[in-house]
Amino acid sequence: MSRAGRVRYDPDARFTPGALVVRASEVMALLREPPALGRARVVVLPSQLNAAENPIDFDPRTYALAEYLDDHTGGPRGQLACDLGLAQFLLDNAAHSLDPGRGIDHLRECAELHPHNGYLVNASAGGRLKRARVLILAALDVPVAGVDSGLTHLPAAAAHTVGLVYASAVPMGAAYGNAGPRAEHVAKALLTAQYAAAIRVAALSQSPVDLFLMPLGGGVFGND
């Protein structure tokens, strides 16, 4: 968030991709690994649609950053690996049901869809997705200064920085009201919009960029 402003769409711009590879890694190790000399690194980090990493029924008055220590999925571990002040800021400012209409909400300008504590629910009840109204939060130049992979101590200083793009899949299944072709369409469109926005964010860098598109929603969210 050190460079405020929207990513402007340029229909005449051309993107020349570099090598595309699949990498099996662990998010904390990936973030702590220094980028190659002269290159920047941007990582799509799993979160919710409020840019935090919280359960669907969380209460912001009692849910603290320490809760991440017991969650070993990619989102919380990625948050803990980087600047803890940023992670706390996201928790403090995430949209939630106790104060509707306020806080970080990637679908705030998409009036047809209404996340609950960052989780998109009931998308099969007639929701639509207007790509021009999907927002995304990215933090650039974030110090990798969080806890180590053993969750035991902080480093003396950050050796490098990374860019983080916060993105979320749609939890599929009848329990969330997200079953059937309509919900599947929304889920696919939302993933496409967020990954495309991540490429746009990476393009803000003045250096060559290694962009890591972490998979979203392939676990308990049930995205095929």
Image (cartoon, rainbow, N blue to C red):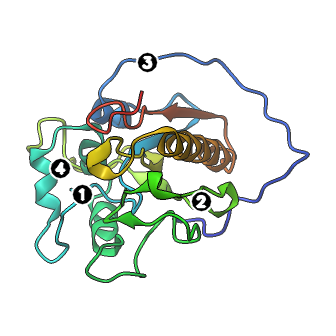
Q: What whole-number distance in Å separates the C-alpha atoms at marks 1 and 2?
A: 20 Å
CB of mark 3 within 8 Å of CB of mark 2?
no
Sooner in the amino-acid sequence: mark 1 or mark 2 = 1
Q: What whole-number distance in Å separates the C-alpha atoms at marks 1 and 3?
A: 26 Å
Of helix, strand and loop, which one carries label 2?
Answer: loop
Along the line of sight, the residue nearer the viewer: 167 or 4: 167
Front of the two marks 2 and 4: 2
Sooner in the amino-acid sequence: mark 1 or mark 4 = 1
Q: Return the residue at label 4.
A: 154
Q: Return the residue at label 2.
A: 134
Q: Return the residue at label 1.
A: 54
Along the line of sight, the residue nearer the viewer: 145 or 79: 79
Q: Residues within 10 Å of mark 1 (few under 14, many from 20)?
A: many
Q: What whole-number distance in Å separates the C-alpha atoms at marks 1 and 4?
A: 23 Å
Sooner in the amino-acid sequence: mark 2 or mark 4 = 2
Residue beneath the point at 42% across and 44% down = 169
Amino acid at the residue labelled 1: Asn
Amino acid at the residue labelled 2: Val
Along the line of sight, the residue nearer the viewer: 104 or 146: 104
Amino acid at the residue labelled 4: Leu
Q: Return the residue at label 3.
A: 23
Amino acid at the residue labelled 3: Arg
